[in-house]
Image: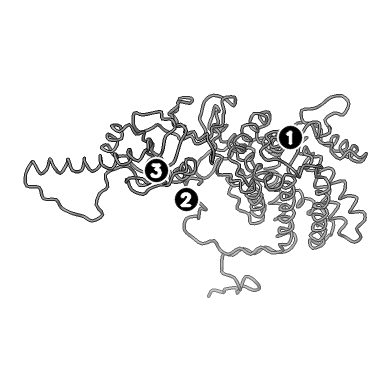
């Protein structure tokens, strides 16, 4: 005789195989612990001296980077609470394109301090209330720290652009920020539209070619296509372009048909007719004034033969996204079938030439004259990993340019802003009554994460630096930050950022701190975790393997 014990409580309500965690110990503190682990990973990559992480994803692809957004994307975080931090980092990356590391690390620090408060007896609701007041106050103080006059900016003035961009690029490629910022600024200014608020990040392209070094990098007005031209003509200047999305070949009929041939003469004529038809089409294109044909599909042997005869240059672009960009660069309308293009459908190019850069042949499409829509940054480096990291730095720079087109206000960088926020929030916490004040004080303490991490990553003494920074800020100099290259006898490594010219965008800090506080409060609000039994079958992937980013 078998006795079956009946489940009771939540167990009786849910399907077998579920998981249920509740209470402070099981849910809240375990969630905080998972988030702390995630922020520990990203924290050591914060700032210019941040360490690189080597991540190998599920497809065996190797990433060597200190870009937090890439790291957390490839880690495939499983824990639901840590996922909230990952989402906050992603939101920051999509909104601004920089500062994802600050978002995740700061949220982790807030939760670590919340854990201390919970262990001393505070309820999560009181901590959330304190944190909410603190972030509101932080945003007020951040407005006051904005550099005077920085709200007015000419986005086509290279010097002003580089000043705001340098810090974002330096956090990815320390020591190379001057060369890279100058390249990125050139590329962005070239494609900046009349109304800078409409700046499109997609218009600055990056092409990575192994070999050479950073001094070989350059900006090209127009596009660089990997691969050679199809025919024997390799260079054309000031020419009209026709784009055929469906390929350049004799088209088959849409309906199936059978041809009966009775004699050899008919067979010969049949072949000649096809030849004549292709020649007629290619001649029509040549007569329209086009010197260059761009094909989105296959280029037939016979079509290529006639293109050579009529001195037409043939390019093949198989990616439809690249084809669209090409049309945007040259102002061409893509035609579906090989036919005579109308004058309006033709685009114009200053020059197309096949060049050899570091052993790989590329087609350079230059469009120097007005209405330039696309610029390409050609990156050179010794390995693929270095090139990928350089591309991420360019990405950050371009996104920072987009952010400054919307809001160009600057705040002091090098942890000067964070120390000032910490000092002002501590003062604010003393004025508060009730239990909120402890949460606000801990929020203020969390800001010390930035100078502490910058110092630790650079191999300096964090406690010494933080106390010196507080001392300088208390005496009224709110622009003193950490100088990682410094070490002169008088001030040690604490210097005025306006002399070092290190500035961060106000909008980057604003969103990073806001998202971090929101993520921390969301995690603290959770008191139970109920997980259903996972469904069987293969694990779901967000994106099919090997898909193009576009």
Give x and y (percent) for residue 345.
Answer: 41, 46
| Relative vertical location of residue 439 with respect to residue 285 in this rendering, above or below | below
Judge depth for marks 3 and 2 and give the one in front.
3
Give residue 323's quadrant in the image: top left
Label 2 SS: loop
Instruction: Mark 1: give few (<14), some (14-19) or many (20+) Cα within 10 Å.
Output: many
Q: Residue furthest left?
A: 263
Residue holding disc 2: 544
Direction from residue 224 to residue 97 in the image, left or right: right
Q: CA distance from mark 1 to mark 2?
A: 37 Å
Direction from residue 274 to residue 79 in the image, left or right: right
Give residue 135's quadrant in the image: bottom right
Label 3 SS: strand
Instruction: Mark 3: give few (<14), some (14-19) or many (20+) Cα within 10 Å.
Output: many
Q: Which mark is residue 256?
A: none
Label 1 SS: helix
User: Does the residue at mark 3 contact the one at mark 1 (Cβ under 8 Å)?
Assistant: no
Q: Specify which label sits upstream in the sequence, 3 or 2.
A: 3
Residue holding disc 1: 457
Give residue 192's quadrant in the image: top right
Q: CA distance from mark 3 to mark 2?
A: 30 Å
Q: Specify which label sits upstream in the sequence, 3 or 1.
A: 3
User: Does the residue at mark 1 contact the one at mark 2 (Cβ under 8 Å)?
Assistant: no
How many numbered markers are drawn?
3
Residue holding disc 3: 243
Q: Nearer the viewer, residue 486 or 187?
A: 187
Give x and y (percent) for residue 164.
Answer: 71, 38
Q: Nearer the viewer, residue 113 or 257?
A: 257
Direction from residue 538 to residue 396 in the image, left or right: right
Q: Specify which label sits upstream in the sequence, 1 or 2.
A: 1
Instruction: Mark 2: give few (<14), some (14-19) or many (20+) Cα within 10 Å.
Output: few
């Amino acid at each position: 005789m078998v006795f079956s014990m009946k489940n009771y409580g939540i167990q009786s309500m849910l399907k077998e195989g579920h998981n249920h965690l509740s209470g402070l110990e099981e849910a809240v503190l375990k969630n905080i612990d998972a988030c702390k682990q995630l922020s520990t990973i990203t924290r050591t990559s914060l700032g210019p001296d941040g360490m690189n992480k080597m991540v190998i994803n599920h497809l065996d692809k190797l990433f060597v980077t200190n870009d937090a957004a890439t790291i957390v994307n490839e880690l495939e975080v499983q824990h639901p609470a840590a996922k909230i931090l990952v989402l906050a980092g992603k939101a920051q990356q999509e909104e601004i394109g920089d500062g994802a590391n600050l978002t995740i690390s700061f949220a982790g620090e807030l939760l670590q301090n919340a854990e201390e408060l919970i262990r001393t007896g505070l309820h999560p609701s009181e901590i959330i209330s304190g944190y909410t007041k603190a972030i509101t106050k932080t945003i007020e103080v951040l407005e006051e720290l904005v550099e005077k006059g920085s709200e007015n900016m000419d986005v086509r003035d290279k010097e002003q652009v580089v000043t705001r961009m340098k810090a974002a690029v330096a956090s990815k490629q320390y020591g190379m920020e001057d060369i890279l910022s100058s390249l990125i600024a050139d590329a962005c200014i070239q494609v900046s539209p009349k109304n800078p608020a409409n700046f499109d990040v997609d218009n600055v392209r990056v092409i990575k070619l192994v070999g050479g070094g950073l001094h070989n990098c350059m900006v090209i007005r127009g596009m660089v296509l990997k691969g050679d031209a199809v025919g024997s003509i390799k260079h054309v200047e000031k020419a009209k372009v026709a784009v055929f999305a469906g390929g350049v070949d004799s088209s088959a009929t849409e309906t199936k048909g059978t041809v009966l041939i009775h004699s050899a003469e008919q067979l010969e004529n049949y072949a000649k007719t096809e030849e004549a038809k292709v020649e007629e089409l290619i001649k029509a294109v040549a007569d329209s004034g086009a010197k260059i044909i761009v094909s989105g599909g296959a280029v037939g042997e016979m079509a290529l033969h006639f293109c050579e005869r009529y001195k037409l240059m043939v390019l093949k672009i198989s990616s439809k996204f690249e084809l669209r960009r090409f049309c945007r660069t040259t102002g061409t309308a893509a035609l579906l079938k090989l036919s005579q293009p109308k004058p309006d459908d033709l685009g114009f190019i200053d020059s197309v030439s096949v060049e050899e850069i570091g052993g790989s042949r590329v087609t350079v499409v230059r469009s120097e004259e007005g209405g330039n829509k696309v610029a390409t940054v050609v990156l050179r480096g010794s390995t693929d990993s270095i090139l990928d990291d350089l591309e991420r730095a360019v990405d950050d720079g371009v996104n920072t340019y987009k952010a400054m087109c919307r809001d160009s206000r600057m705040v002091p960088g090098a942890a000067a802003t964070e120390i000032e926020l910490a000092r002002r929030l501590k003062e604010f916490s003393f004025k508060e009554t009730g239990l909120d004040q402890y949460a606000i004080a801990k929020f203020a303490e969390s800001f010390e994460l930035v100078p502490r991490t910058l110092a630790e990553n650079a191999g300096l003494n964090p406690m010494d630096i933080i106390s010196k920074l507080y001392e300088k800020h208390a005496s009224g100099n709110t622009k003193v930050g950490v100088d990682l290259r410094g070490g002169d006898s008088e001030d040690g490594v604490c210097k005025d950022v306006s002399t070092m010219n290190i500035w961060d965008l106000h909008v980057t800090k604003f969103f990073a701190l806001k998202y971090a506080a929101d993520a921390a409060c969301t995690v603290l609000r959770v008191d139970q975790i109920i997980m259903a039994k996972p469904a069987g079958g293969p694990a779901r992937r967000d994106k099919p393997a090997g898909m193009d980013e576009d």
